[in-house]
Image (spheres, rainbow, N blue to C red):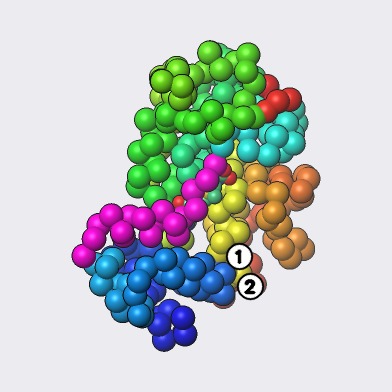
């Protein structure tokens, strides 16, 4: 599609869903949308928008396609092992109760993975876990505790399945005791206000789809939302660019600690399976 068609489509999608494509990487988004629209027998973007306007299901399908909400329990075992063995024990030594945010939580598998780790590491403490996503449908699924397919639990220790899941015709639903530990909310990382005083923010495989400027803005918002010494956990394919003076100290490839001495509202010049548990 040419730039005019993309501009038209962006405007329509914003009107119909409030989803702002401007925050996402343009070239990648155009490529993906071209492939998506090619499945329809339409001559141009205007015709495609008419379909969206007249059919709620088609609009929902497109939203699902745009948000890419694949997730699973203990996605990236190596990183969850570091979380379990190094990051959480240190945070638990320094704080009685943790305030955790899974941002862009998709189906909730990520937030439940942390809730289960905390249940193992500190069974008698009540932590707070907030889990948010822009996608209303996926958040309802998460808040209901699933059900999840066996494939989504491929990294989950078999011996603990019975303790943390109910079997529902071969699928798995998180037990109520763990489900109730998490507050699931609808939240757009690019538009809605952030809470603060978090000890741990997990935002993985979300910002990768955003453009460079939006990534920088979100990184600063995460910094402001963390307590000093709080930790940001990012995806393995995401890096914290321009590490110099961005207010974070690198702990390892996916973990970054908010440095002490960072002003309350830090101003950045650019701003103008197995083995875990
Ligand atoms: C690939 S999933 C990542 C899920 C989980 N964090 C993980 O790594 O397994 C990306 C999620 O980001 C959400 N997302 C995309 N744009 C968002 C935005 N602007 N605000 C909040 N969530 C967003 C999508 O709805 C989707 O559920």
- Range of residues picked out in magenta: 54-71
* Residue at the image position 35 percent from the left and 38 percent from the top: 140
Cα separation between marks 1 and 2: 8 Å
Q: Mark 1 highlights which residue?
A: 216
Q: Dot 1: what SS?
A: helix
Residue 170 position, x and y percent, is 46, 21
Q: Dot 2: what SS?
A: helix
The reply to whether discs 1 and 2 touch (Cβ–Cβ < 8 Å) is yes
* Residue at the image position 62 percent from the left and 18 percent from the top: 158
Earlier sequence position, callout 1 versus callout 2: 1
Q: Work out whether 135 lies above or below 27.
A: above
Q: Specify few, some or many for label 1: CA neighbours under 10 Å numbering under 14, 14-19, or 20 or more.
A: many
32 sits to left or right of 12: right
Q: Mark 2 highlights which residue?
A: 270
20 sits to left or right of 215: left
Q: Quadrant of the C terminus?
A: top right
**Does the closest atom of ligand 1 sit within 8 Å of the Cβ of label 1?**
no
Q: Specify few, some or many for label 2: CA neighbours under 10 Å numbering under 14, 14-19, or 20 or more.
A: few
């Amino acid at each position: 599609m040419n730039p005019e068609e993309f501009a038209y489509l962006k405007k329509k999608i914003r009107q119909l869903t409030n989803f702002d494509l401007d925050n996402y990487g343009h070239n990648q988004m155009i490529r993906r949308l071209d492939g998506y629209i090619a499945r329809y027998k339409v001559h141009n973007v205007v015709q495609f928008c008419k379909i969206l306007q007249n059919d709620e299901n088609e609009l929902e399908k497109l939203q699902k396609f745009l948000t890419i909400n694949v997730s699973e329990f203990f996605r990236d075992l190596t990183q969850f092992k570091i979380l379990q063995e190094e990051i959480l024990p240190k945070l638990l030594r320094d704080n009685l109760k943790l305030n955790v945010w899974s941002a862009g939580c998709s189906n909730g598998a990520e937030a439940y993975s942390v809730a289960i780790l905390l249940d193992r590491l500190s069974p008698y403490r009540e932590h707070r876990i907030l889990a948010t996503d822009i996608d209303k449908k996926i958040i309802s699924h998460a808040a209901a505790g699933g059900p999840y397919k066996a494939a989504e639990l491929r990294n989950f220790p078999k011996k603990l399945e019975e303790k943390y899941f109910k079997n529902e015709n071969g699928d798995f639903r998180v037990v109520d005791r763990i489900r109730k530990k998490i507050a699931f909310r609808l939240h757009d990382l690019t538009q809605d206000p952030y809470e603060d005083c978090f000890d741990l923010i997990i935002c993985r495989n979300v910002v990768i789809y955003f453009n460079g400027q939006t990534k920088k803005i979100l990184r600063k918002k995460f910094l402001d939302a963390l307590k000093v010494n709080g930790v940001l956990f990012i995806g393995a394919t995401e890096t914290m660019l321009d590490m110099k003076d961005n207010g974070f100290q690198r702990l390892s490839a996916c973990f970054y600690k908010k440095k002490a001495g960072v002003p309350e509202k830090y101003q950045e010049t650019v701003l103008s399976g197995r083995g875990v548990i």
